[in-house]
Every structure is written in C-alpha cells, then in structure tokens.
Image (cartoon, rainbow, N blue to C red):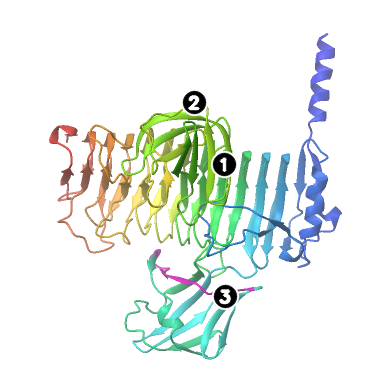
Amino acid sequence: MKYYFLCLVLFGSISLKAQTIDVTKFGARPNSFADATESVRKAIEASKAQEQTVLNFPKGRYDFWPDQATETHYYISNSSSEAEFPVKKQKVGLYLKGLKNVTIEGNGSVFIFHGKMITWVLDDCAQISIKNLAVNYERPGMSEMTLKEVSDTAVVADIHPDSRFSIVDGHLEWYGEQWIAKNHHAVLVRPEKGMLLYSSWDPFFKSKAEKMEGLRVKFKGDFSKFKGKPSEVLSVRDRYRDYVGAFINRSKNIRLRNLYMNSMHGLGIVAQFSENLDYDSVFVEPEKGSGRVIASSADGMHFSGCKGQITINNCRFNGLHDDPVNVHGTHLKIAEIVSPTTLKLRFMHHQSYGFEAFIPGDTVAYLHSASLQIFEQGIVKTAKLISEREMLVELQKPFSAGLKVGDALENMTWTPSVTIKNSRFEGTISRGTLITTRRKVIIENNVYYRTGMHAILIENDASGWYESGAVTDLTIRNNHFIECGFNSAPDNYVININPQNHEVVPGYYVHRNINITNNTFKVYDAPLLTARSTRGLVFADNKIEKSDFLPANKTKPAFTFTGCTQVKVSGNHFYNDAPREIKISGMSSSDIKQLK
C-alpha cells in the first residue's frame, strides 16, 4: 500500500508539471524588431490546452504593434470620462482571458510597445505569474525636454530623443506612433534634487518655436511667469487617461516578479475587482541610462475594488505624474428608491463608471454621503448595469426608512488587506501612498523620499472622487519619511488622515485604530500629522530629525487634530527646538493624551 501511495504521489506531480511553450515556436523572433503580437497570441492560445504552462520568452527584445493586437472594451476605474474617451476600446499586446496556472517567463527580455496599447491584460484569470522582463514604449507617452536657457522672452531646450515632435506653423507639436498630444499637462523636474513641481505648457503653447541644431528648439514668447531654470526638465503629457499601463480584471492569485515598468501610458498597473495580488520587485521607474525622468503618466499601481491580500514588497517608484500606490473602493450614489428592496445607483465621478461595482452576494454598507456615517448593511440579491452610469441593485431584505436618495453604498466584500513593505517612493508630483480599506493594513520598512505631497494620505469620500472607504486597522511602522510635502504647503503634513465628512455626527468617527510608531521623520518644516474624525490614533516612539532642505515655517503646528478621540502622542524623540505644538478643534483636551 505504501508503494501504491508513492506511485500516486509521483504520478500526480508529473501530471501537474508545467508544460513549457516557447514563443519562438510560434514565430516570435527576439531582436528582429518584427511584430511579435500575432505569434505571442498563438502561444497564449496554445496554453489553454495545458493544465499548467510556462510561456517562455528567450532573452531578447520583442516588439508589439497595435495593428494585429486584440481589441478590448473595458471600463476602467479612474481612467477617462465620456467626453475624454467616449468609446472604451483599447488595443492590448498580451491578452490573457479565462486562463489558469500560467507563468510568463521573460528571462530578462524587453517588451517594446508601439502606438497606444495596454501592455497586458489579465481578465477572469487565476494563478498567473509574470516575471523577469522590462516594459517600455518605442515612443513613450511622456514628452521631455531639458531647459538650457531661460529668460522672460525666450526658452531654449533640448528635446529628448525619445520625444517625437514637429514644428507646424511655428508651433511645437508632440506626436507619437499614430497619436498626437492635444490636452497638455506639464510637470517640472529638478533631477539633481529629486523634486517634481507643478508647471504649465501654456507659455510654450502660445509661443513661436524655431528648430535649431540637432534636437534643440528655441521658444519665443512671454515666459515671465515660467519658473523653470536651466538643467531642469519639463515633462509634458496628454492629461486624458485613454489607456492604462496594464490591467488585471476579475482575476485572482496574481504574482508579479522582477518587472521593470519603464514607461506606461495613462494610469499605471490597474487591478480592478481582483483578489490576492502579490507584487515583488516591481520597479516603476525610467530605464537606467535612458536619460528620461518620467516612467508613468499617472499612478504606478492602482487597486480599485479588490479583496483578499495585496502585498507590495521590494518595489521602487520614481518618475510619476501621480500617486505610486492608490488602494480604494467606489461609492455609488442612490439616485432612486425603486422599491423597498431595490435601488437605482449612479456612478458620480467623471473618470470612474461602467463597471460592475456590485454582484450577487456582496455585502454593502449604507452611508450618508455628507457625514460618511454607515448606518446599515445589506446583501445584494441581484445587480445589473442598466447604463454606463447606472446600476439597478436588489437587496435580499428591505432597507430601513433611514435610507434616502442622495445616500451612498459601499461594497464591503471587495475590500482588501494590504501590506506595503521594503519599498521606495520618490520622484512623484503628488502623494506616495493613498489607502482606504477597512481590512488590516501594514505599511512598514519603506522609504518615502521627497514626495511632492503627503507621503501617506487616507481619505474616504462620497462627494468628490467617491473613493471608499473607512479605515479600521492601520499600522505605519519603521519607515523613513524624508523631506516630503513641499507641493502641499502650507498644509504639508507628512501623513494626512482626511476623510471628507462635511457634516459631523456627534460620537461617530469615520476612521479608527491607526498606529504610527517607530518611524523616522526627517523634516524641513513643522507639520508631521493631521487627522480628522479618527478614533484610536497613536503617534508614538517616532524620531524627528531636522533638515535644511527648504526654508521652514515654525509657526505652524506639528500636529492638527479635528474631531478625533482616543488620540495618544507619546515617546517621540524630537530634535532640539523642534516645533511640537498640537492644535485641536471639534474635540476636547480629554480626547488626547500627550506624554513625553
């Protein structure tokens, strides 16, 4: 019997051994610069017949063009409005639909994408790994130019070789492979200081451009309000997010390993209603030696309505026009009470709509939009999109009379636990990490270096972005926060807990159980932490060091607490003469405990 059992075990292991599918067997040729899209699609199709597959790319360069790429139709959270991108059709380089147990092994290859494409899509997939490859674009969506001379009447700049341009009727036009930028958004980069600052393309758009030698261009116009200086880089993109870098939709158990995302159009790696996502050594940054300073036109990693465990480990983010990491759900507003159990819901933000925000079996929270007070829960019986903007949701049981038109629903089922560790956040115009989820969150052993705005922002709102929800268990520990927030002055707090509850309900707190311990804050200014409507907030055993990075305003408080309770500030080590003022409003002194 023991021998028979051993045979079964061995047979089982053999039957589950991964079948290697080499993309070169289907016509893909590394370093040929030929279009590999169709060949790779055939290799992906062949993997459907296997229980477990390694899709193998021998090391080299692989080019993907939109001509033969799969055309998809996805509504993607936080991407584009009806006016900006009315028909949601996207070309995809690597399209995996309904696949299981597949590993994409890059072996150190570089995937070069042409035109506007989503690099890869995982839809309704499970147990997928993507590893050991770099992603770039032949013509990145970001245009960059280094300033050489700046005066009130003229600017001379060197255009980066990857940024295609033409001078038409005396005006510079940015263009790519079958696209042209029309809705310009500009960010000024100071590479030697690792700083990204808000700027404008308007004076260049209105100026006269003249091509000089090589890739040098002279702009003549009114630059009296332009703040750029020689050696700085002006980065310019189209502000419409018609594409995303990569997309994971309704999938689970996804692993990303050793990926270099050197350039991404629009929003970055977007995961939507997906479960158990493990990202290790994913580097969102420009290719080393490329001379470029921007890797993503918007976020690095974006998680909308996910669940299970999200882990971000050993990752780097540098060169982004928006947030490196954003984790949230989506509030939908009640447009009509159709019956005692049925609601018509509406997507409210112009860039987030059209996806199935609820499915049968989901647990939902009912909340008042202005106060964010959750007053009841229900379970979805049926849910249906009836238009791009509206859903009809039937609940298992009648809701109470407290529910009104204008209230909102949050999907409590699709909320993840999150761990972010051993990672570096820098070179971003905005925040380092945005996070709103009710499950356990740990942010530890990271470096936040000169993020333009708050290193960590915790919001929750049902009136602006409609990004949900309440935080109930968050630990921020053993991180280094270095000179963050210079774009947020005067409210340049390193950590900002800022739920958008415009109406205060006595005794109700939006967030709770937030612990900020054993971190190092290297600050040039007084603000450290601001929080509102939070119960159980601890700021303890942190080290605050002084920096001369920028001029400081010591008249500002180090802490601002609004409508909070059970706040504890203790055991922190401040540099000599450090501002330590605590400002409170909407609460009493008994709501806060301060110890040396």
- The magenta region covers 179-195
Disc assigned to residue 397: 2
> Which residue corresponds to mark 3?
163
The furthest residue to the front: 339
SS for callout 2: loop
Is residue 476 found inside the magenta-colored segment of the image?
Answer: no
Query: Looking at the image, is 390 positioned above or below residue 224?
Result: above
Q: For the residues marked 2 and 1, what is the alpha-carbon distance in whole angstroms?
A: 25 Å
Q: Is residue 112 left or right of residue 533?
A: right
Query: Looking at the image, is 204 positioned above or below residue 24?
Result: below
Q: Is residue 126 left or right of residue 183?
A: right
User: Is residue 518 something one can see in this rendering?
Assistant: yes
**x and y, in percent, of residue 272 in the image:** 56, 45
Task: Tell me which residue sits at (41%, 61%) in the image.
Answer: 429
Instruction: Please state which of the two labelled residues, at mark 2 or mark 1, is closer to the viewer.
Output: 2
> Which residue corresponds to mark 1?
273
**x and y, in percent, of residue 84 in the image:** 53, 65
**x and y, in percent, of residue 329 in the image:** 47, 43
Foreground pick, 99 / 544:
99
